[in-house]
Image: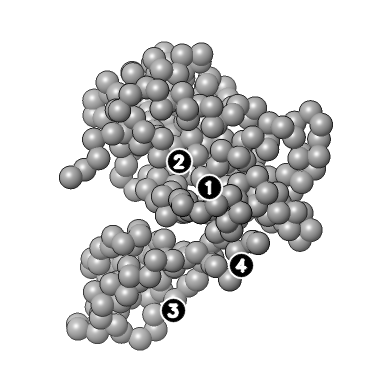
Amino acid sequence: MSDPTLPLTIIGGYLGAGKTTLVNHLLRNAHGQRLAVLVNEFGSLPIDADLIEAQDGDLTVLAGGCVCCSYGDDLMFALTQIRKLDPAPDHVLLEASGVALPGAIGSAIGLFGDDIRVHGIVILSDAETLPGHLNDTYIADTISRQLDSADVVILTKTDLASSDQMRRSHDSVHEHAPLAGVIESRGQDVDSELILSHIEALKKPGQSREGHNIRLVTNVLAMSEPVDPEAFAQKLAADPDILRAKGHMISARNQQPVTLQLVGRRYTVTGAPSTAKPGVIVIRKDHSRALA
């Protein structure tokens, strides 16, 4: 039975961490989902111009059946309006302002009723500036409280950070969000389905606050030899550390290319174009690199 509640993901993080980049990336890679984006005011989230199809007051119609709605000071009213949309959205993204506390927003949404549930809180942190910000008297409390609320922390702009800044950033995340999954990102390289459909796999319920952060690694399997696609997919799906896999392989039965899409334990194997290049990208939890 499908879940009748509407999932809502809160995207937070300090100014300049990359929230706008992530939201536009998710809109471009929604894989058929209708997304509703809530922003405090339109000026705070410049949706890419080529995604905008029409504007009407506080509602902007976006490509792919998505919408963007400004909620100002009345979040509950905006959620009520989102619930009335026809067709209904599949998922809501709420982009919090850079100085907002996403945990408090999540608590407020929890009072809304049973129609909307908080799917997760994603906090973006600039890996280059995070260590310095946490030593800044004026903003350290805000940033630490943002991290405290995170189910997933995305360390952004990792290509600009030094190895020392990366180490200190990971240490800071471990201190303030020891149960959060950690994703390293250079920009628009975050797998959208991890955020839209699979945050639960990155959380660590039942562990103490002294638990380890989960880090994710990406491997590319060459798939140079034909395989039994169904058996291969089942093997990946049975591995609890694998969160996502997608790519192409050659079927041993008829030597034809097929496409694999796997999220958690769910997968599909379908026909692929004859020009599809074999290779499967796998995103998995890396316990060997977990931070103590």
Q: Distance from label 1 to label 4 (Cα)? A: 17 Å
For the residues labelled 3 and 2, the Cα–Cα distance comes to 33 Å
Amino acid type, label 2: Gly
Residue 152: assigned label: 1
Pointer 4: residues within 10 angstroms few (<14), some, or many (20+)?
Answer: few
Q: State how far apart marks 3 and 4 are (Cα).
A: 24 Å
Decide which of 221, 152 is in the foreground and name it: 152
Q: Mark 4 or mark 1, which is nearer the start of the sequence? A: 1
Q: CA distance from mark 4 to mark 2?
A: 24 Å
Coordinates of residue 50 in the picture (x, y in percent):
46, 35
Q: Kindly check if marks 3 and 4 are in contact, taking CB atoms under 8 A apart as contact.
A: no
Q: Label 4: which residue? A: 289
Lower sequence index among marks 3 and 2: 2
Relative horizontal placement of residue 223, taking residue 155 as reference (left or right): left
Q: Which residue is mark 3?
A: 222
Kind of residue indicated by mark 4: Arg
